[in-house]
Each structure stands twice: as C-alpha cells, then as structure tokens.
C-alpha cells in the first residue's frame, strides 16, 4: 500500500496551507516553501498555479497521484460540474467521513483507524480508506475497539460535524444523510484550476 510517510509540515509549507493543526504554528513562523531556494522569487505562471492547486488538494485529502487522476476521470464522466463532482468523491471517502464525523483529530489518524479495521459500514468491517460511502450508510466504531479513548478525546476537542452527516458521539456512530453540496465543503480548494490543468 503506497502512501506518503514524510513530514506533513514540509508539505504544508510547500502548499502554503496548514494540512494539520500542528502545521499552522510552523507556517506562522516560516511561511515560505522549504528548501534552499524557498525564499527566492518564483515566477508565477498559469500552469504553476494549476499544478500547485492540484498538489494541495491531493495532500489535503491524502491521495496519491494515480488515484487522484482516476477520481478526476470518474468525476468528468458524471453529470454536473466536474470540479464539484471531484470534491464530492474526495469528501465521501471513508477516512474523510470518519474525520468529518469528529471521530479522529486528523485525516491521517482517521486513515489509520480505518486501515486497522476499527470502523464498520452498515455493520460490516471496512479497512479501505478510499471506500466510497453513500447516503443512508451507517458508520460506527467496532464494539470493543481499543481506540475508544482516542475517539472520545477527538470528539471532546470540539469537532464540528459536517451538515451532510449526522453523528452520535456517545454511541460512536454516524450516518450519511446525503451527498454534500459545494458550499458545505470547506476545503481550501479552487477546483476550477484542477479542471483547467487536466483539460490541457
């Protein structure tokens, strides 16, 4: 299973947006890209803006390039606006839904919980982070899972549940009410730039 295991702070500095809560304090202190030439002048071009937006979106959701390209192809074949379809596909990944329900502090933690088989969808154990949830799906923590304390801690921090989801933090379960609308997705993404990049 391929995935990025390097420092999230480095990626946050590269994209100029905090991909984790911890990364924000580093961005406040060093808000320029990492590396020897991080503070140098970069010639902005249309292609560079589009590429950086695509990379930022990939890293925000923790998706690798090949999978992201497949998501885009799937989104372009669906009716409606391609950019919004792409964001909906990314938002309805199981690891993201676990995070949006408030059962994990970060998407990385949510991914780990899912991979270790601590969550069920409609009563069946699912350990695939990219599993696409659908309206009326019930997501719940497996009874007796050893992560109960960590999930409880994540819910107490003050997690806000997305409006297209319904969460029961006491029972460690949630429900997908519907597919999210664009204005309900608070990801710092300009999806039109991604569409322009892949349309070339």
Image (spheres, rainbow, N blue to C red):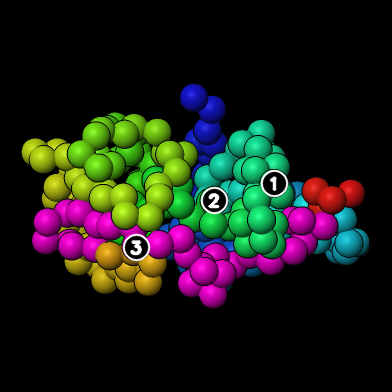
Q: Is residue 169 magenta?
A: yes
| Mark in the foreground, 1 or 2 | 1
Observer-nearest of 163 and 179: 179
Dot in front, 2 or 3: 3
- The structure residue drawn at horizontal position 14% and vertical position 47%, both measured from the top left corner, is 148
User: Which residue carries the number 2 mark?
Assistant: 89
Choose the circle earlier in sequence order: 2 or 3. Answer: 2
- SS assignment at label 1: helix
Of label 3 and label 1, which has the lower sequence position? 1
Question: Viewer-proximal residue, 13 or 92?
Answer: 92
Residue of label 1: 77
- Residue occupying image coordinates x 28% and y 42%: 121
Residue 86: name its quadrant: bottom right
Q: Residue at the location (77% across, 56% down)? A: 195
In the displayed structure, 131 sits above or below 42; it is above
Q: Left or right: where does residue 92 sit relative to residue 154?
A: right
Q: Is residue 108 left or right of residue 12?
A: left
Specify the label residue 170 is tagged with. none
Q: Is residue 166 visible?
A: yes
The part of the chain drawn in magenta is 167-196
Look at the numbered disc 3 and give the secondary structure of its residue.
loop
Element type at mark 2: helix
Circle 2: is it few (<14), some (14-19), or many (20+) Cα within 10 Å? some
Task: Compute the Cα span from label 2 to label 3.
Answer: 15 Å
Q: Is residue 81 rendered magenta in the image? A: no
- Which one is nearer the viewer's eye here, 43 or 64? 64
Which residue position is annotated with label 3?
Answer: 177
Spot the residue most to the top: 1
């Amino acid at each position: 299973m391929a995935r990025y295991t390097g420092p999230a702070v480095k990626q946050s500095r590269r994209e100029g947006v905090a991909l984790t809560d911890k990364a924000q304090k580093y961005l406040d202190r060093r808000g320029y890209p990492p590396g020897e030439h991080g503070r140098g002048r970069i010639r902005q071009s249309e292609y560079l803006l589009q590429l950086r937006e695509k990379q930022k979106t990939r890293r925000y959701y923790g998706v690798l390039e090949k999978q992201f390209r497949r998501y885009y192809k799937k989104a372009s074949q669906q009716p409606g606006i391609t950019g919004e379809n792409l964001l909906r596909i990314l938002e309805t990944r199981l690891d993201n839904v676990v995070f949006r329900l408030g059962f994990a502090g970060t998407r990385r933690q949510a991914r780990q919980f899912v991979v270790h088989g601590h969550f069920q969808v409609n009563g069946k154990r699912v350990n695939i982070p990219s599993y696409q949830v659908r309206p009326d799906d019930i997501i719940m923590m497996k009874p007796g899972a050893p992560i109960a304390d960590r999930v409880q801690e994540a819910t107490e921090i003050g997690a806000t549940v997305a409006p297209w989801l319904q969460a029961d933090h006491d029972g460690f379960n949630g429900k997908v009410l519907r597919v999210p609308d664009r204005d309900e997705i608070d990801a710092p993404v300009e999806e039109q730039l991604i569409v322009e990049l892949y349309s070339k």
